[in-house]
Image (cartoon, helix red, strand yellow):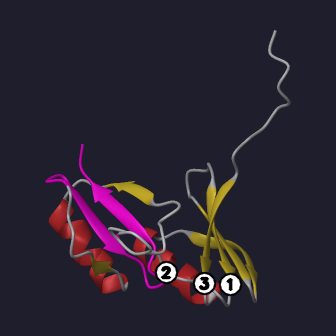
Amino acid sequence: MDSRPQMMLTGIVLDSPDARELAAFYHRLLGWTATKDEPDWVTLGAPAGGPGLSFQTEKNHVPPVWPAGPGDQQMSVHLDIRVEDLDEAGAHAERAGATLASFQPQEHVRVYLDPAGHPFCLYVD
C-alpha cells in the first residue's frame, strides 16, 4: 500500500523582472490565455487542461547562461515544446520575441531564449 499523500502538479513558475511582460510573450508563443492576472503574478492556462504556466515578478532575477560555464548563473529549469516543423515554429518564436541561442546541441532540437533569458526547446519527434 502506498502511504504518500495525494499530490498533483498544477503548474510551472518562471521568475522574471516583469511577470506580465513574460506572460505576454508566452501568450504570443503558445496562444494560452490568462487564468489569473495580478501585478506580480500571471498564470496562463493550457486550452486542453493540465498544468499551467505562471510568471512571478522577481526584481533581482538573473537570467541563466546557456550553455553555462563555471561561475555562470545556472539554468534550473527549461521548457520542452514539441512542434511539427522546426523552421516554422522557430520563425514564430522569433516573431513572438524569442532569441535563437548561439549553442545548438542537437539536430532535431532548437534552443531559444525567452525575453527574461529562460531557455526553452522546440523539438520534433
Q: Which contiguous range is marked in magenta?
A: 106-125
Residue at 39 percent of width and 75 percent of height: 65
Choose between 30 and 121: the one closer to the eye.
121
CA distance for labels 2 and 1: 11 Å
For label 2, count other residues whose C-alpha is less than 10 Å away and answer few (under 14), some (14-19) or many (20+): many
Q: Under tag 2, what secondary structure? A: loop
Q: Is residue 95 above or below residue 55?
A: below
Residue 10 in the image: x percent, y percent? 70, 51
Mark 1 = which residue? 58
Question: How many other residues sit within 10 Å of disc 3, few (<14), some (14-19) or many (≥20)?
Answer: few
Q: Position of residue 3 (x, y in %)?
A: 85, 19
Residue at coordinates 75% horizontally, 89% vertically from top-left?
39
- What is the count of numbered marks? 3
Which residue is at the far front?
70
Assign the N terminus to one quadrant of the image: top right
The front one of 12 and 44 is: 12
Q: Which residue is mark 3?
A: 61
